[in-house]
Amino acid sequence: MAEKATTEFWRDIKPIANVFKADAKAETYIANAPTDDERYYVPFSETVSSRPLWISPSQNKWADILMAKSAGLVNRHYHPHEVFAYTISGKWGYLEHDWTATAGDFIYETPGEGHTLVAYEHEDPMRTFFVVKGPLIWLDEDGNADGYFDVHDYIKLCKDHYEKVGIGADYVESLFR
């Protein structure tokens, strides 16, 4: 239940009794999403990791916090679908663009974009909230397709990591919506 209002003008408004339709799933609430507990960050590359927050296997979509504690590189990839990003801390960008994102910056990536994601050295770790509709198409140095990564690969990566660090593979399923 939400915290009880004390002085707010809406304090006497009653909550809706029947919040969810019969077939609706509950919302996902994760306190302190950009946690410092590194067990929740799944290694995505040698220098970048991902904390899954929400996963939709049926939509091939996920939301996560991407983190690099120092200079980092995911790899070159192409998005056939849109991506949304909001920078929480640190500094990051794409080698192919003329901007560098810092805390508070929002980025909308259009479908059909290929780029090389990098995190810069910064006093704060790079933490960025992403909403990704997969797949990601891995690219070689010339920009040619060299593999893919979709929600099912992400789920396996997360389950393997969470089992290894003692959180348990089934934790990932609690994020399915």
Image (spheres, grey):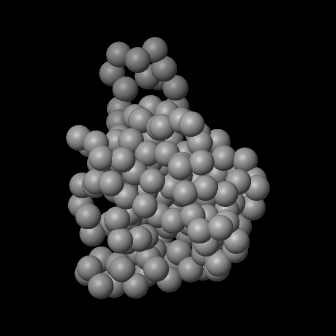
Q: Position of residue 152 (x, y in %)?
A: 60, 79
Q: Residue at x 33, y 54 (%)?
A: 71
Q: Residue at x 34, y 42 (%)?
A: 90
Q: From where the camera sits, is residue 105 visible?
A: yes
Q: Residue drawn at (59%, 68%), measured in percent from left and top? A: 141
Residue sitting farthest toward the front: 142
> Left or right: where does residue 3 sit relative to residue 14?
left
Q: Quadrant of residue 66?
A: bottom left
Quadrant where the C terminus sits is bottom right
Q: Nearer the viewer, residue 98 or 68?
A: 98
Residue 131 on image: x %, y %: 58, 53
Residue 23, above or below 32: below
Give the vertical position of 12 relative to 138 (above or below): above
Q: In the depicted view, which residue is nearer to us: 166 or 86? A: 86
User: Residue 108 or 23: which is nearer the viewer?
Assistant: 108
Left/right placement of residue 141 relative to residue 92 reads right
Q: Position of residue 11 (x, y in %)?
A: 43, 22
Left or right side of 5 for 173: right
Q: How many marks?
A: 0
Q: Tell me where residue 97 sits by quadrant.
A: top right
The reply to whether residue 177 is visible in this rendering is no
Quadrant in which the N terminus appears: top left
